[in-house]
Image: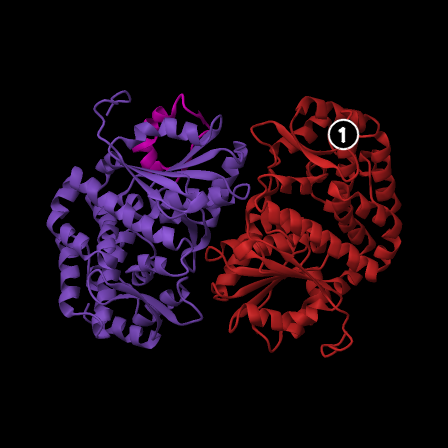
Chain colours: A purple, B red
């Protein structure tokens, strides 16, 4: 794609996130990156822009982004963090913030987060606390970030207690999801992001799930079906976020599969043994399985969820995780530390069927421990 | 004051900070601490409370606070940080947040900041980012914190680039200013806080300033005049904060004396050579002096401000700072890094007279440098 190919550029789709004074657009489409220069110029006339990215993404896309911005905004030196979840820590947060201060980034300037979920969460959090809040733009480069983490304003870092336990709600000023950036993803990364796409179908859109069952090959191959899936996911997320920005209610539905998933990520030390989307895939199957155990959901629904995730090559069972993941007791400990715990009682997203997820409060920790012990013994 | 002395307790005054869904009360009065237990019980029924304080304050007041809370809320182990501005750093922030996570503090729980501005800023910021936001209560123990920093939701830490450059707007759920806590302050600390009281008169309340000129001896002695001064200051701050929570306009008036003051604090390495309120006192005189230089303000007003601050024993001139404070160039550098700089042009709070402060944008840095050089040469 050349910089000048305006005439031949496919149309982008724009999804609005309606949050009053904090409303913003998600621009979705192949080549959307090339439109970013004028958009940033409008957001911050006369302002400066600092790109935050990681080493891997910098190699693939940084030059292209810098070229797209040239002439439209003044660029501060980019900040490049090491790739991987371990960059979501206090040390990197301090380093990024101090580089922003070294560059004398001011309140009217912009931070651009170019990368996957890790970069978006870290750069967004740094922007949230720099001078008590500087605006930022998400340019997600992974499927997971395009359909989930770049939208909704959740930013943060991890501690030894768990993931995302420290952070801020800080909505981006703009999200630009250029689907052409996904071409450099490994199949494993793409699959992991796809788990979040499936999630939207499982929460409240049975027909979308059905469409995914029939269309996943085209989505994985790229092209219009992929963009359609991404846009549908962004619309779903946007709608839920607009109705409950700070997760006092319905937004918790987006955690379907995440409470189990986070515990599994913690159990594998947030390593490449199990990446986030894989944890979510297994976590969603566990959530459906536990719903079946409680008599809330038909076994056939659990099987259908499992079958689709398996078809695309995602792990769906504890047995699919290599190496040690501890016992049921240690998994429950990870869950208890999760921030979705209220007053010591467990809150889970369970389901009455595909497209019928709901927030279940006061779930009995002992029963969940027993369920996990059974699943572990079948491993 | 005994725990049970309800009948003899003097009435407390309550000032509301009207911020819609984030509105809260400031409770002012001698013995207000003893009412805190039931109030926290109401704010977080069944919840847990974690007190954050510093070593000095802990010695004087921690036991009294714990006694006041006993039976009303469950207490997590208190966090005690070293006293002084140097605790407003990334290292202490991380330590405080991790102690909160160690104690499994949850979203419905409460943090209580018991201390001066440093503790309030640090604990408030930790609460702001813990699980993306936990509520906190300010229990200010210094005059400065009671009349200024505990109200308005500005929280944060310092970096080597300057003060408060990293932080969050996070409104407290309640402020309890027990004026009896001020009895343990050193005269120097009390005087430093008094500079912020004077500030409210200088901004837009000439008659309050006049009252201070006549009443400062009673205010320093304690008693009704002191409570009156504190309540008037809280009302002034509350009004300005309610009209401009995030400092997009009028709230900047509260920075009167602070741009110069911060630069002087930086020049003295944030040491005991010049504490915050002292920097503000000199800064306010400099702001009036610079306003006179620009022909905006009568020299008699500058003299009157200086005379009152001198009467209470506050420093009013660069010559009153012991040791090296660098040259005009380095002071301007400190000012340029200040977060109130927009697009490289300087914004100052200047005055057309006592009670007539205003926001002056596009102030010429070269002229300010020259002014500072003159003041330094007279040192």
Quarter location, residue B376: top right
Mark 1 chain: B
Q: Residue A372: x percent and y percent?
A: 26, 71
Q: Is residue B377 left or right of residue A378?
A: right
Quarter location, residue B327: top right
Quarter location, residue A359: bottom left
Q: Is residue B295 left or right of residue A349?
A: right
Taking the magenta stretch, the answer to whether it contains residue A28 is no
Q: Residue A123: x percent and y percent?
A: 43, 42
Q: Residue at x 47, y 66 (%)?
A: B104
Q: Residue at x 65, y 46 (%)?
A: B240
- Viewport quadrant of the C terminus of chain B: top right
For the question of whether residue B274 can be seen, the reply is no
Asked if residue A172 is positioned above or below residue B6 in the image, the reply reads above
User: How many numbered marks does the figure carry?
Assistant: 1
Q: Residue B60: x percent and y percent?
A: 73, 65
For the question of whether residue B168 can be seen, the reply is yes
Q: Which residue is the site of mark 1?
A: B291
Q: Nearer the viewer, residue B323 or A233?
A: A233
Q: 10 Å neighbourhood of mark 1: few (<14), some, or many (≥20)?
A: many
Q: Residue at x 52, y 31 (%)?
A: A103
Q: Nearer the viewer, residue B234 or B165?
A: B234
- Secondary structure beneath disc 1? helix
Taking the magenta stretch, the answer to whether it contains residue A76 is yes
Q: Is residue B9 left or right of residue A137?
A: right
Q: Is residue B252 left or right of residue B11?
A: left
- Stretch in magenta: A54-81
Asked if residue B177 is positioned above or below residue B152 in the image, the reply reads below
Q: Residue at x 12, y 45 (%)?
A: A217
- Viewport quadrant of the N terminus of chain B: bottom right
Q: Residue A83: x percent and y percent?
A: 35, 42
């Amino acid at each position: 794609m050349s910089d000048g190919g305006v005439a031949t550029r496919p149309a982008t789709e724009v999804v609005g996130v309606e949050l009053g004074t904090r409303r913003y657009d998600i621009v979705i489409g192949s080549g959307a990156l090339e439109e970013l220069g004028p958009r940033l110029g409008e957001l911050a006339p006369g302002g400066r822009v600092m790109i935050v990215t990681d080493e891997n993404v910098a190699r693939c896309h940084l030059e292209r982004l810098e070229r797209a911005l040239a002439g439209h905004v003044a660029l501060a030196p980019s900040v490049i963090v090491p790739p991987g979840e371990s960059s979501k820590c206090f040390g990197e947060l301090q380093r990024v913030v101090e580089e922003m201060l070294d560059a004398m980034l001011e309140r009217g300037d912009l931070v651009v987060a170019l990368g996957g979920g890790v970069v978006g969460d870290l750069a967004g959090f740094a922007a949230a606390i720099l001078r008590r809040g500087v605006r930022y733009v998400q340019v997600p480069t992974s499927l997971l970030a395009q359909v989930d983490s770049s939208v909704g304003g959740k930013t943060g870092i991890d501690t030894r207690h768990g993931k995302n336990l420290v952070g801020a709600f800080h909505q981006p000023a703009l999200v630009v999801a250029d689907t052409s950036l996904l071409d450099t993803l490994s199949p494993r990364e793409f699959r992991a992001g796809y788990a979040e796409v499936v999630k939207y179908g499982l929460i409240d859109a049975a027909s979308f799930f059905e469409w995914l069952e029939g269309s996943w090959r085209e989505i994985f191959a790229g092209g219009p079906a992929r963009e359609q899936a991404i846009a549908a996911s962004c619309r779903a997320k946007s709608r839920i976020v607009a109705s409950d920005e700070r997760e006092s209610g319905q937004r918790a539905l987006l955690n379907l599969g995440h409470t189990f998933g986070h515990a599994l990520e913690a159990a594998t030390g947030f390593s490449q043994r199990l990446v986030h989307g894989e944890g979510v895939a297994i976590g969603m199957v566990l959530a459906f399985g536990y719903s079946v155990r409680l008599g809330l959901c038909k076994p056939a629904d659990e099987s259908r969820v499992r079958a689709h995730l398996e078809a695309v090559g995602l792990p769906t069972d504890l047995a699919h995780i290599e190496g040690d993941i501890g016992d049921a007791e240690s998994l429950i400990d990870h869950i208890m530390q999760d921030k979705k715990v209220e007053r010591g009682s467990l809150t889970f997203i369970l389901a009455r069927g595909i497209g019928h997820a709901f927030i279940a409060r006061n779930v009995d920790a002992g029963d969940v421990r027993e369920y996990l012990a059974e699943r572990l013994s079948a491993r």
